[in-house]
Image: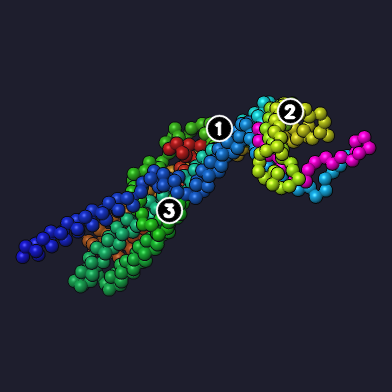
Amino acid sequence: MVKMYNKLLIFSFLSLLLSNSLWAQQEEDVYTLEQCIDYAIEHNESVQNGEIDELISRKKVGEILADGLPQVNANLDMNYNPVIPSMVFGGQEVQMGATYQSTGSISASQLIFNGSYFVGVKAARTYNELSRKELIRTKTDVLEMVTKAYYAVLVGMERKELIESNYARLDTLFQETSVLFEQGFAEKIDVSRVKVQMNNLETDVKNIDLEIAVAYNLLKFQMGMPVHNEIEVGESIKDLSFQMIEDDLDKTFEASNRIEFSILETNLDLVNLDIKNVNAKYFPVLDLYGAIGTNGFGVELSDITGFGGSYYRNNARVGLKLSLPIFDGFRKSKMIQQSKLKVDQIENTKRQLANNIQFEIKQARVALISARDALIIQDDNMELAKEVYDISLIKYQEGVGSSIEVMNADNEYKTAQVNYFVALHDALNAKVNLQKALGVLDKQ
């Protein structure tokens, strides 16, 4: 008996641990919009590739900087001369060299002045800044897609809740109509009409479940999450303030808020640095160099493979090397002219971008105002349609109305619900579009 009691205690303890583990796992699978965005920033493949590009550009800066550090090389050369060259001195032929020769040396050089090098370092750092801004643009795009996908799930969940409420309402009506039919106060066709509506709602319930599943899969895809993972949204439509206030609608645009503008500015900096780089190539280049080594020679191979003895002679040298460009066939001049034309192109693109953004903002504002107004109207229509249905139902229950009137009111109520959710989805997306146009989507 004691053993059985102990077993029950162990089983209860394990069951409690398992239930707590499952509960904890379920908690981990619930995501708010902010958590979905955080997950996407960490796992979305486009963001990951952008982070790799930014890291590559940082390594590029190190590569350019390495050119200004001391360069050290070791060299070893061994060769066999089957025919030794000779020269004639005073009428006698003298061989110049040996059958076997070897040369070993260590050389070092240090850049002292090169204008192009210093400009190149600055250009590499500017390119790193460009990669960082491209990463910000990628994150903004991902944030937009995740937000819209999350809203689609919320709208689907809200629709499902309303459809289930409609089904419960019709089920009650079906039960009441069936009782009235049994008591002789309603006709069989009245029961059938309600049943048809219930069957249609059962189909709607199945369809909305599929739509929600598709919306969840899209959300997980945008987040960079495996689609077989099971997650739940941790918010509802009621938790969101999706209607922009008038101050937001009247907010003025600041170019600095749009990452596209900042990217163009950085590209302009790069082209100007390219011009400076080409100009710097007109200046001389000065290097300090030095080398130390040894030369070996001998009649036999063993004379030089021992690395020592009388067959080896040491040598060393230190010097300065100055290179001064004189004429390159106007190559650098043509390169500068090309870069200046690129500057003109970027300036044109900036003006075009500014115009496009202003147009985009105006369109987004109009779309949001229209969607907000439509949502208000559809919300009123849904409330009115519900009132009409409730009155029709009361009249039917009191025997002064018909089942056809109730069914028509029910259809109008469901149509109003569909229109409301379409307007709701449009309003949410319009909000996101305006925030992105203003460059404040990542600051919400």
Q: Position of residue 219 (x, y in %)?
A: 43, 53
Sequence-wise, the earlier of marks 2 and 3 is: 3
Mark 2 vs mark 3, CA separation in Å: 58 Å
- Amino acid type at circle 3 is Met
Q: Which residues are magenta?
A: 88-108
Q: Which residue is the extreme one toward the right?
A: 91
Residue 130 relative to residue 327: left or right: left
Occupied quadrant, residue 317? top right
| Scheme of colours in the image | rainbow
**Can residue 192 be seen in the rendering of this structure?**
yes
Q: Kindly identify which residue carries mark 1.
A: 255
Whole-percent x, y for residue 306 in the image: 65, 43
Q: Which residue is mark 3?
A: 225
Q: Quadrant of the N terminus?
A: bottom left
> Helix or strand or loop: what does disc 1 sit on?
helix
**Residue at the (66%, 41%) spot, across then down:** 307
Q: Earlier in the sequence, mark 1 or mark 3?
A: 3
**Residue 224 % position (x, y):** 45, 52
Q: Main secondary structure of the magenta part?
A: strand
Upstream in the sequence, badge 1 or badge 2? 1
**Visible residue check, residue 380:** no
| Residue designated by label 2 | 321
Callout 2: SS: strand
Residue shown at 49% from the left, 43% from the top: 139
The amino acid sitting under disc 2 is Lys
Image quadrant of residue 349?
top right
Residue at horizontal 36 percent and vertical 46 percent from the top: 32
- Give the residue displayed 75% in from the left and 27% down from the top: 322
Residue 438 shown in magenta: no
Where 72 falls versus 187 (above or below)? above
**Distance from label 1 to label 3 (Cα)?**
34 Å
Q: Nearer the viewer, residue 190 or 30?
A: 30
